[in-house]
Image: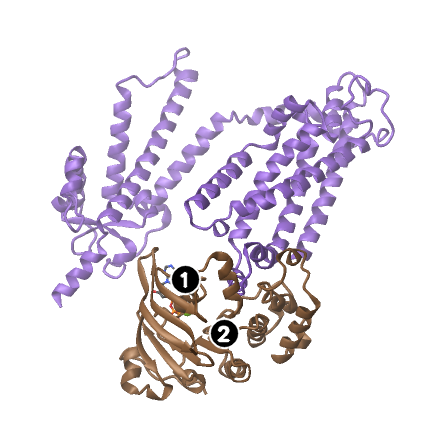
Amino acid sequence: MDEQLVIEHLSKVYERGEVLALNDVSFTVKKGEFLVVIGLSGSGKSTLLRCINRLIEPTAGKVFFEGVDVTAASSRELLRIRRKMGMIFQQFNLVKRSSVLTNVLAGRLGYVNPWLSVIHKFPREDIELAFKNLDRVAIRDQAYKRADELSGGQQQRVGIARALMQEPDLLMADEPVSALDPATSHSVMKYLEQMNQEDGVTVITSLHFLSLARRYGTRILALKDGEIVFEGLPSEIDEARFKEIYGDEAEHVEVS
Amino acid sequence: MATKQSTLRSVKRLNRFGALKTRFGAFFVDWALWGYVAYEIVYLLNRYWYTEIHFYGRLTVPAWGWPIVIIGTLELAAISHAFANSIGLSLFGLTVLSQDYKYPTGIQRLRRYLWWHVSLLSLPITLFSSDRKNKLLHDRMSDTGMFRIKDVKDEMPVTTPHAWYKTYRGMTGILLIALTIWVGWLVTQISLSALIDRAPKTAYMWKALVTPDFTHMFALDPELAVNANPDLPASIFAGLLQSLFMALLATALGGVVAFPLSFLGARNMMGYSPMGWVVYWLMRGFFNIVRSIESLLWGIVFAIWVGFGPFAGVLALSVHTIAALGKLYSEQVEGIDPGPLEAIRAAGGNRLQVILYGVIPQIVPSFLAFTLYRWDINLRMATVISLVGGGGIGRLLFYYKGQVGRLDNAWNQVAAVIAVIVVVVWFLDYLSGRVREKIN
Ligand SMILES: Nc1ncnc2c1ncn2[C@@H]1O[C@H](COP(=O)(O)OP(=O)(O)OP(=O)(O)O)[C@@H](O)[C@H]1O
Ligand SMILES: [Mg+2]
């Protein structure tokens, strides 16, 4: 039973605009995998990731995480499940006016006593953990700066530190490097790789560039118009498959 | 190829519902504008008939006059639609072109105008008989059509534009503005002669106003019948303090109540359940209605309720503050970046934590700025709210003004109060401006 995440017949219809964003998607993810989701803009990558932790409510289908039915969880259970799923975002999603440290600590909110969090009080261990995680992504010295004073790459590292605070079993990343330049992209992707290989965290990330997907992914899932059009090893994507996923007029763009 | 072209064109022509809606909208605007012109003409006729022509009597539109006005304005609107780029058409970005995308000829325009009557008289039939391309009867009979300018930009004939005052729009605009000023002048009874002739009478007042009498700045004015009027502040300074505290309390009270309410009045906080909508609309309605009733009017209510004096003033200012700040606050809440909220929810944070860690840090600066700004407004209000019995420094102002004729130096006392108000209001305005700069 090493299948950590099981997705069964997942569909999502956005009422507004009547968009079928996900159409009967099924797949499984094993513990320790580095799964990359690729696909054109609008193919449903963000929707898929958000349906897994129910930031978006799926219309039909089931999600099992470590044997627990996420789609059937009560709102209280859902908070518990989400704690174990870290998430990082394309636009970093930091509170810009808050300090880096506060942003990182926010990743711990699922664990702390809700009443103590009202007065912004975190246990000493959590604060130590926050510094440890900031250390890990090499921005400890920025801890007291406002989040929006940091560069894009640094902000995404804050996002990673925030996700690390959850001590997650699964890390989801929605186009984590799309807002960054190529060199910074790699430095951020390396942290994901490190979490995957050293801590054994399962990673599911959507990426725009096939070259990045090939470099970091152990498995690739391609979406097109809300349906899975390819599932397999990075090496299996040849020219024909590429055209199928990205359309006939697509060209390879390399990120080195 | 030809079919592709023609489908493109038929798509470009306004689609069925959108088309008719915009067409009616444009026509209605023109009709309303001509109605406004008609009203002003009747007003002017009435005015000069009454004062110059017929010394007694009043021009009223007789019963049979109304159909004439209605039909006349309809005709004018139709004419301006058929023969020119009327204001209604330009507002909705529409234009009349012939089927081959040229400007219609005079004959076509005339046919369009005449057939329009048939269209109008058989309106229901016209609507149902509009074909797939949304051509109405008068479109078809004149070989013209109504197009959205942005759709036919490329096909439209290129012409050198006329000077703006030579266009129909420019001329109608000038006519409307001129009529408005003329009628407005009469309605508001503007009288330059009064302004000039009676100026010398105010000389003594101006003289007093520039020589304020500060004797009772801090000292009790023996003239003040303090015992008979317990709500009269004992000195100018005491009145000032009263106003300052009224503004402070009203702002604090209003802000504290408006803060939680603003979340209920913010779309993004209320979700999209039916319950969410109901609460949202109730809150928005409350803000808008209460806000549109000025503090002075609330003052009347509370002066009756709790009696004359600063308490009534505080309540009046507070109520208006709740609504005004509530609305401003909730707009701020609606404008926040949803990203951090999503991140906190993804980390397993509950609703309260999302608000505390995601929403509040984003809104605090603008909330503070708005609150300060409101304090400013409340202070100004607190200086005049005593007009309706709300207490404060204004109480002295109006008291001294009431003493004109009885007290020799009444105007000088009034001047002193005004001077104090001006200085304090100016100073706090400056101060809060500086603080607001700091916050952002
Ligand atoms: N809130 C929403 N309401 C209505 N439609 C939506 C909403 N969010 C997404 N969609 C639609 O659902 C489809 C899938 O969108 P999604 O954001 O999942 O795609 P994506 O693969 O993440 O694209 P991108 O690469 O641009 O981020 C798109 O057609 C989009 O227009
Ligand atoms: Mg996306």
Position of residue B261 measured from the top left corner of the image (x, y, whole percent): 56, 43
Q: Is residue A109 above or below residue B295?
A: below
Residue A144 seen: no
Provide the residue designation for mark 2. A171
Quadrant of ligand 2 in image: bottom left
Three-letter amino acid code at the position of disc 2 = Leu
Q: Residues within 10 Å of mark 2 (few under 14, many from 20)?
A: many
Residue B320 seen: yes
Which image quarter: residue A54?
bottom left
Label 2 marks a residue whose chain is A
The disc at residue A71 is 1
Q: Secondary structure at mark 1?
A: helix
> Which residue occupies 66% across, 39% down?
B253
Colour chain B is painted in: purple
Position of residue B114 measured from the top left corner of the image (x, y, whole percent): 16, 37
Position of residue B409 measured from the top left corner of the image (x, y, whole percent): 81, 23
Q: Nearer the viewer, residue A99 or B219?
A: A99
> Which residue occupies 32% across, 51% down?
B162
